[in-house]
Image (tube, helix red, strand yellow):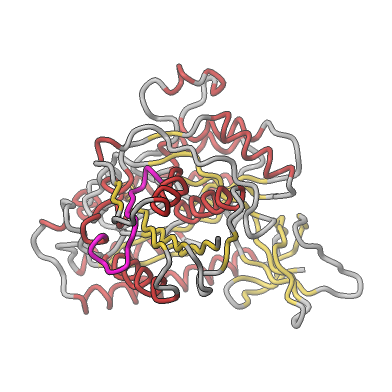
């Protein structure tokens, strides 16, 4: 039987789709592209914005049209927070939430063997307990960088965010399962391991974790996972997908500097540059504390790559609040800024706040943030010009005779093969960064 996946949203969803695909493959199913007719379609949805909900609905309809006799199974954050809405979409056969993904194969087989009544299996948030171990992934599409999921859930309840409702409380993966997966990926030749989760900084923070897993020693939080992975032998590096300043402070970040394998790049979600807005977002840090972390990173490595997310037009955001966000972009010198319009998520605290901004104001501010972010990235590239960084080449473009890879501080590097220079895919190479080029830099 043929199975096709469509995955929306974050890296965690992509990781989980990969893990599911591996289970289907092991049982003899054939994985085909989402544009091909298949017997089973799995749509792994996202609900982080209202646009993500809409896209999820569009894909569900589109995939059923490719084969009206197919089984359509919907999983992920959108089906977790709005199962009835998803069940009403024509052609949906199975609706499941975020904590039953590992059992989706069995559910589909049960559905096929049944009389064909729609199957809805979505747990309530309070029932989302225990880490849903999906098995070891060893067959990522690329052979260079691999994502490894380390935790599930978030209990921070930022006032705009639906994720704690969609993903439930914090559950960390057993350290031995993480280490085993990383070992297998390294043995398969992967050179970069990206640790990911819903809120990666919360790894190992639940009560009793340290007692349950004494192998973590005296290490707290995500440092415990980094420390165990660092002990593995091999030529590889570790990257963190993101850290939340709602969880980590400057001391926690400084502890990470001792791990040589850890890339000099952090994604630290700022969300707003205004203390008033950060407070109304329920995010428990100030811009001054955020800048303290930035100063420590830059003291450690002046060209440390720092990327961020910023929301434009949070309810009640004034012109002055917005200017504070622009000011932070200029001060920090981010290597990448992801800017988004605030999106009202029913059920969150911010959805009930007064003074929601007009869509055109939000869009105008988002555009200005994007443009300030692009300028910041350009300056970051220029600052890096003439420096030597370790690049892991991932792709080779034959027509341009060009290799493409990333530095440890997350600059995309384009390097042309020459008579005296032969680069290789999936190998580290010390590269001199030359000038800004396309969305990154030229190097040799
Ligand atoms: S830290 Fe805040 S923004 Fe991040 S997932 Fe948790 S609630 Fe959402």
Mostly what secondary structure, the magenta segment? loop
Q: Is residue 177 left or right of residue 426?
A: left
Snapshot quadrant of residue 423: bottom right
Task: Examine the rendered structure and indicate whether residue 398 appears above or below residue 429.
Answer: below
Image quadrant in which the C terminus is located: bottom right
Question: Quick one: 149 or 223, which is closer to the camera?
Answer: 149
Task: Give residue 376's position: percent from left, percent from top.
Answer: 47, 68
Q: Which residues are magenta?
A: 87-100
Please name the residue shown 65% across and 35% down the image. Answer: 230
Snapshot quadrant of residue 419: bottom right
Image quadrant in which the N terminus is located: bottom right
Question: From where the camera sits, is residue 149 visible?
Answer: yes
Please name the residue shown 36% across and 71% down the image. Answer: 369
Task: Give residue 283's position: percent from left, percent from top.
Answer: 27, 46
Task: Give residue 253's position: percent from left, percent from top.
Answer: 48, 39
Is residue 426 within the magenta segment? Answer: no
Task: Give residue 388's position: percent from left, percent from top.
Answer: 72, 59
């Amino acid at each position: 039987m043929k199975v096709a996946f469509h995955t929306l949203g974050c890296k965690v969803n992509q990781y989980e789709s990969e893990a599911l695909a591996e289970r289907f493959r092991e049982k003899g199913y054939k994985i085909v592209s989402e544009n091909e007719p298949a017997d089973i379609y799995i749509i792994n949805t996202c609900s982080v914005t209202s646009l993500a909900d809409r896209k999820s609905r569009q894909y569900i309809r589109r995939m059923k049209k490719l084969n009206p006799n197919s089984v359509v199974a919907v999983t992920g954050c959108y089906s977790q927070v709005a199962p009835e809405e998803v069940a009403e979409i024509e052609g949906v056969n199975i609706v499941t939430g975020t904590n039953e993904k590992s059992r989706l194969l069995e559910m589909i087989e049960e559905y096929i063997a049944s009389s064909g009544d729609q199957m809805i299996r979505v747990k309530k948030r309070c029932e989302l307990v225990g880490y849903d171990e999906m098995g070891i992934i060893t067959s990522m599409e690329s052979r260079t960088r691999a994502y490894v999921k380390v935790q599930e859930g978030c209990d921070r309840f930022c006032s705009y965010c639906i994720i704690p409702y969609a993903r439930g409380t914090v559950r960390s993966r057993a350290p031995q399962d993480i280490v085993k997966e990383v070992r297998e990926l390294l043995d398969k030749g992967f050179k970069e391991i990206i640790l990911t989760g819903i809120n990666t900084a919360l790894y190992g923070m639940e009560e009793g974790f340290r007692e349950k897993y004494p192998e973590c020693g005296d290490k707290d939080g995500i440092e415990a996972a980094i420390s165990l992975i660092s002990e593995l032998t091999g030529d590889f590096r570790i990257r963190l997908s993101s850290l939340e300043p709602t969880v980590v402070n400057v001391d926690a970040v400084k502890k990470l500097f001792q791990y040589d394998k850890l890339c000099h790049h952090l994604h630290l979600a700022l969300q707003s540059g205004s203390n008033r807005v950060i407070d109304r977002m329920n995010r428990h840090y100030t811009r001054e504390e955020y800048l303290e972390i930035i100063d420590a990173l830059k003291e450690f490595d002046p060209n440390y790559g720092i990327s961020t997310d910023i929301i434009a037009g949070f309810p009640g955001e004034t012109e002055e609040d917005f200017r504070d966000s622009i000011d932070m972009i200029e001060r920090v010198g981010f290597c990448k800024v992801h800017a988004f319009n605030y999106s009202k998520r029913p059920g969150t605290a911010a959805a009930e706040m007064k003074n929601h901004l007009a869509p055109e104001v939000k869009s105008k501010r988002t555009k200005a943030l994007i443009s300030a972010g692009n300028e910041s990235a350009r300056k970051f590239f220029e600052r890096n010009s003439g420096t030597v960084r370790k690049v892991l080449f991932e792709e080779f473009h034959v027509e341009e005779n060009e290799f493409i890879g990333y530095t440890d501080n997350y600059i995309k590097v384009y390097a042309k093969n020459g008579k005296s220079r032969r680069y290789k895919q999936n190998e580290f190479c010390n590269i001199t960064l030359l000038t800004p080029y396309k969305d990154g830099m030229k190097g040799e």
